Image: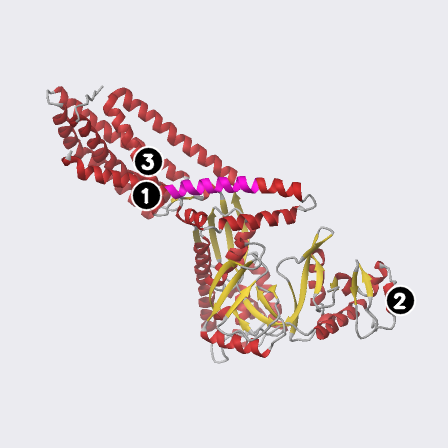
Amino acid sequence: MKEFRFRLILIIFAIGLSIFLIYPTYQDYQHTKDLKKTLSEEMSLLQKSQPQLNEGLLEKKLIAMEDSIKATESFRAAREKRMKLGLDLQGGMRVVLEVNTAKLIEKLAQNQDDAFLEVIAAVKAEAAITQDHVVDILAKKLTERGIRLSRYFGNIREDDATITANLYEETEKAVIRAMEIIRNRVDQYGVSEPSITQQGDRRIIVELPGVAREEEARQLLQGTALLEFKLLKEPDFALNVMQQIDKVIAGKIFNDTVAVVNNQTVTDTAAQKDTAKDRQLSEEEFKREHPFFALAWLDPQGQSADAFVREDHKVTLERIFKRPDVQRVIPDNVEFLFSAKPVTFQDGQAVYQMYLVNKTPELTGNVVTDAIATLDPTTSSPMVSMEMSSEGATEWARITGANINKRCAIILDNVVFSAPVIRGKIPGGRSQIEGMADLEEAKLLEIVLKAGALPAPVDIIEERSVGPSLGQDSVMQGLNSTIVSFILVSIFMIFYYQRIGAIATFGLVSTVLMILGILAGFQATLTLPGIAGIVLTIGMAVDANVLVNERIREEFELGKTLRSAIDTGYTKAFSAILDSNLTTLFTGIILYQFGTGPIQGFALTLMIGICASMFSALVISRVIAEIFVYKGYKLSLG
C-alpha cells in the first residue's frame, strides 16, 4: 500500500477540503430554515398573546428578532462563507440609475440669480427627456439668452470653450466617482457578483443578486450620505416662528392661539387671556383659525417646541414652507426638517416629528473616519457608532463644550435621525446615530457613511426585480437537470462497464463535489449558466472515463493481466484526454475573458469542472481501481 500512500493522501485532502468548504453553505441553509421556523412560531405566539398588536408593530418585533438572530457569530460566519447564488437563482434587482449632473452644475455655479435659476430649471427639464450632455444643454440655453458661461462659472478671463471643457471634466468625474462609491457600498453590503456598468454619459446599470427588499436597495444606491450636525433653535424661538407662519397662512393676525384639536393642546404662552374661548372652538373652526397648527401640533407635554405631523400632511407643509409669504417670516438662517422615521401612529397614520434647526451645520460627515452598526447594550436598539478624524474630534469637543444642555440634530440627507441633548463636552470624536428601525437599516447607514458621499444625487429611472419564487424555480430546474444527467450517466457506466463503471461513477461524485467546493472556497457565484457548465462537465468526465475503460478493455483482451491492462490503459488514454480537455479549457478561458454575465458564469464552472474531472478520472478512479486489484478483488469490464 506504500505505493498508493501519497495519492491517497492527496485524494483525501482534496475531498475533505471540498466538504469543508461546502459545509458553511449547508450550515447557512439550515440556519435559514430554522430562522423561518422560529419567526413563524414567534408570530403565532405574539398573535395569541398580544392580539391588539397591529401589523406594523408585529412586523417590527419580528424584524428585531430576525436581526438579533442574524447578528450571532455562527449565523454571520456561515453566511459570509457560503456559496453565493446569482440573480437568476436567488432573485434580486436590476436598477438603472441616472446621475443628476444638472444638480452638480447648479452647485458649481457662482453668483446665482433669477436668470440662472430659470435656465437651470429649463436644463433639468430638457435633460429628463433627452440624452444630450447636460453641459451642451446649459451652453445652448445661456447662448439663447445672450449670457456667457463665465458669468456663473470660472472667471471673467476664461473663454467659454475652456469653461465648457472644465464642466465636461467635472461631470465625467462625478459619474466615475458615483460608480466607485456605489461599488464600495454594494461590496460592503455583501452582494455577490454585482454588475455595475456605465451607460451613456450619466447612467449607471446595477444588478444586485439576492437583494429582496426594494427599499434597502434604494437607500443603498440613492443615499447621498450628506451627514450634518445642526443645533436646534430654542423652544421660544421655534414656537414664535410657527405662530407667525400660522398667522400668515390664516390671512389674519391673532393674539391668541390656544385650542384643542385631536386631543392635542396647542398653546401660545404669550397669550393666555381667552383660553376658555379658544378651547371651545370646534375642530372645523380651529382649522380655519389656525391652519398651521391643524397640520402640526406641539408636544402635549410642553417639553419642547418640536411639532408632530401626520404622514399625509408632510407634503402640504413642505408646499407651505415654499410659499413666498411664508418664507418672509421664516428667518434665513433656519429651516424645518422631519424625522427619518415615524415616532408614533395615530388612527393608522404614521406621525413624524418636525424640528426647527440652523441651516448652517456645525459639523459635516467629511470628518467621519469609521462607522460601525451595533445594538445599544442597554436598550438593544440599533445604532451606528462613529469615529472622527483628529480635526473633527477637536471641533466636536469645542461644539459640544460650548452648547451644553442644547439639542443637536444628527441629520443624514436632510432627515433627522436623532436630536439628543448635549449633556457635556464630548472629547475623542465619538458619537452615535440612533433612530433606525432595525439592525439591517443601521448596517446600510454604516455602509453609506464608510463609502462616502455621492458627488451628485442619483435617480432611479428603471427598476426590475426577479422574485425569489422565480429564482427558486430556476434552482430546482437546474438541480433536477444535474441530478437527472448524473443518474443517466451513472446507469450507463455501471450497465456498460460494470464494476469499473461504478468506480467511474464515484469519480463523477468527486468531480461535482470538488467543483462546488472550489466555487464556495473562492466565494464565486453560481448561476443558471454555471449549472449548465456543471452538467456539461459531467458529460465530459464520462468521455474521459470511456476512453480509459475502452483502452483497459483492449489491453485486457490482448492477454495482459488486469493490473497491467489498467496501467497501460491509463497511460495510452492520457494524451487523448489531455488534448480534448486542454482545447475545451482554452475555449473556457476565451469565453471568460471576452464574455459578460451569464457567459462568464458558464465559462467559470466549465474551467473548474475540466480540472476537477481530469483529477477524478486520472487520479481518483485509477487509485481505487489499482487498490481493488492489489487487494485481489475481481473487476469486471462488462
Q: Which of marks 2 and 1 is nearer the N terminus?
A: 2
What amino acid does circle 1 point to?
Ile
Residue corresponding to mark 2: 277
295 sits to left or right of 458: right
Asked whether residue 601 is drawn in magenta, I would say no
Question: Where is 46 relative to 121, above or below?
Answer: above
Asked whether residue 25 is drawn in magenta, I would say yes
Q: Which of marks 3 and 2 is nearer the N terminus?
A: 2
Q: Which of 317 and 620 is in front in this view?
A: 620
Pointer 1 local density, CA inside 10 Å: few below 14, some 14–19, many at least 20: many
Tell me the CA gap for discs 2 and 1: 80 Å
Q: Which residue is drawn at 56% across and 77% down?
A: 399
- Secondary structure found at label 1: helix
Where in the figure is residue 454, as x and y percent of width and height? 50, 63
The residues colored magenta run 23-40
Residue corresponding to mark 3: 512
Q: How many labels does the image show?
A: 3
What amino acid does circle 3 point to?
Val
Pointer 3 local density, CA inside 10 Å: few below 14, some 14–19, many at least 20: many
Q: Which of marks 1 and 3 is nearer the N terminus?
A: 3
- Most common secondary structure along the magenta stretch: helix
- Secondary structure found at label 3: helix
Q: Which mark is residue 340?
A: none
Residue corresponding to mark 1: 518
